[in-house]
Amino acid sequence: MKKKIFSLILAFSLFFGIASNAFAAAKITPADQTILGTHTTASWTLSWSGGPSGWYMVYFKPDSKYDYKIIDYSTTLTSKRHSEQYLIRENAAFHYPQLKVVDLEDPGMVVGVAQARVYQKGY
């Protein structure tokens, strides 16, 4: 009976330990912003926490129609500033930038993801 209880406690602690790493936080600040001009720049503070190794690879996608690009190959920091230039041909557009942070020693381990919204208004 004691072995079963011990096994159950061990299984739950492992599950919740893994689950807490899988749902670690990532954040883009500000989450909403307005930029003016047809060719202009948006800037953010990107932050994250968690990950078993403490080493991170940081990906950023400037809009949902683009692929992720690596903006930091190897860091122990948990935040950084980032800017992107946006060019539009119409009067206004929405952009949906996304952040993804993975554990450097286990690239399959996603530390966190976040999305923001940018409203770009031309002149």
Image: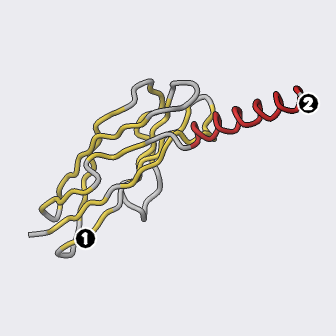
Instruction: Tell me the residue at 25%/49% (across/down).
Output: 30
Residue extending furthest toward the bottom: 90
Where residue 113 sits in the image (x, y, percent)? 47, 48
Amino acid type for the residue under numbered disc 2: Met
Where residue 67 sits in the image (x, y, percent)? 47, 56
Residue 106 found in image quarter:
top right
The kind of secondary structure element at disc 1 is strand
Instruction: Tell me the residue at 28%/46% (across/down).
Output: 29
Where residue 96 sits in the image (x, y, percent)? 35, 61
The kind of secondary structure element at disc 2 is loop
Q: Quick check: 46 left or right of 57?
A: left
Within 10 angstroms of label 1, few (less than 14), some, or many (20 or more) residues? some
Q: Quick check: 21 left or right of 80?
A: right
Q: Nearer the viewer, mark 1 or mark 2?
A: 2
Q: Is residue 121 above or below residue 81?
A: below
Numbered circle sitting on residue 76 = none
Q: Earlier in the sequence, mark 1 or mark 2?
A: 2
Q: Is residue 78 above or below residue 23?
A: above
Amino acid type for the residue under numbered disc 1: Ala
Which sits in the foreground, 9 or 64?
Answer: 9
Total labels drawn? 2
Quadrant of the rendering where the C terminus is positioned? bottom left
Q: Is residue 19 above or below residue 119?
A: above
Numbered circle sitting on residue 93 = 1
Numbered circle sitting on residue 1 = 2
Which sits in the foreground, 48 or 90?
Answer: 48
